[in-house]
Image (cartoon, grey):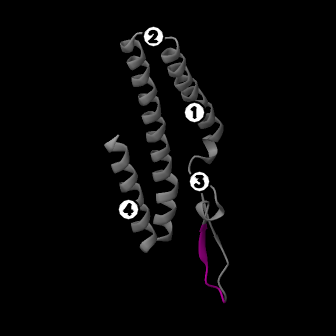
Amino acid sequence: MTTTEATEPAGTEAVVTDHDRGIHGYHHQKDEHLKRLRRIEGQIRGLQRMVDEDVYCIDILTQVSASTKALQSFALQLLEEHLRHCVADAAVKGGAEIDAKVEEATKAIARLLRT
């Protein structure tokens, strides 16, 4: 996940992480995530079709609930990957960066809880 490269003059070394290289926590499961999002997109299209076909309200609400749960599950997986990758990379670097990443994750959790 992290490597140390000589980027500073005269023998000082800086920690360069995957995050510095633009590699995000979900990178290794990107195809799986895209597949999952396409499935959720299909659920949403199904909702549109149900409304268009005048399906019973409770049946539509059941599908809304399933779609919502699928998105929440995806969000939790992405949050876990963020904590394992981005926050962990910041912890390796230390300093104010870890505080910023923890605050960022905390705000993301708060947004998820409001939904």
SS assignment at label 4: helix
Find the distance from the CA under tag 1 to the CA under tag 3. 17 Å
The residue carrying pointer 3 sits among few (fewer than 14), some (14 to 19) or many (20 or more) residues within 10 Å by Cα, namely some
Name which residue lies at 54% across and 17% down: 49
Q: Are marks 1 and 3 in contact (CB under 8 Å)?
A: no
Q: Which residue is mark 4?
A: 103
Query: Reading the chain from its start, which is encountered first: label 4 or label 3?
Result: 3
Quarter of the C terminus within the rendering: top left
SS assignment at label 1: helix
Q: Nearer the viewer, residue 23 or 58?
A: 58
Q: Are marks 1 and 2 in contact (CB under 8 Å)?
A: no
* Region in magenta: 10-16
The residue carrying pointer 4 sits among few (fewer than 14), some (14 to 19) or many (20 or more) residues within 10 Å by Cα, namely few
- The mark closer to the camera, 2 or 3, is 2
Find the distance from the CA under tag 4 to the CA under tag 2. 44 Å
Q: Which residue is mark 3?
A: 24
Residue type at mark 1?
Leu
Q: Are marks 4 and 3 in contact (CB under 8 Å)?
A: no
Q: Which residue is mark 2?
A: 55
The residue carrying pointer 2 sits among few (fewer than 14), some (14 to 19) or many (20 or more) residues within 10 Å by Cα, namely few
Residue 6: image location, x then y, percent: 67, 78
Residue type at mark 4?
Glu
Identify whether 107 is placed above or below 9: above
Residue type at mark 2?
Val
Q: Nearer the viewer, residue 14 or 11?
A: 14
Q: Find the residue positioned furthest to the bottom.
A: 10
Q: Are marks 2 and 3 in contact (CB under 8 Å)?
A: no
- The mark closer to the camera, 1 or 3, is 1
Identify whether 56 is placed above or below 65: above
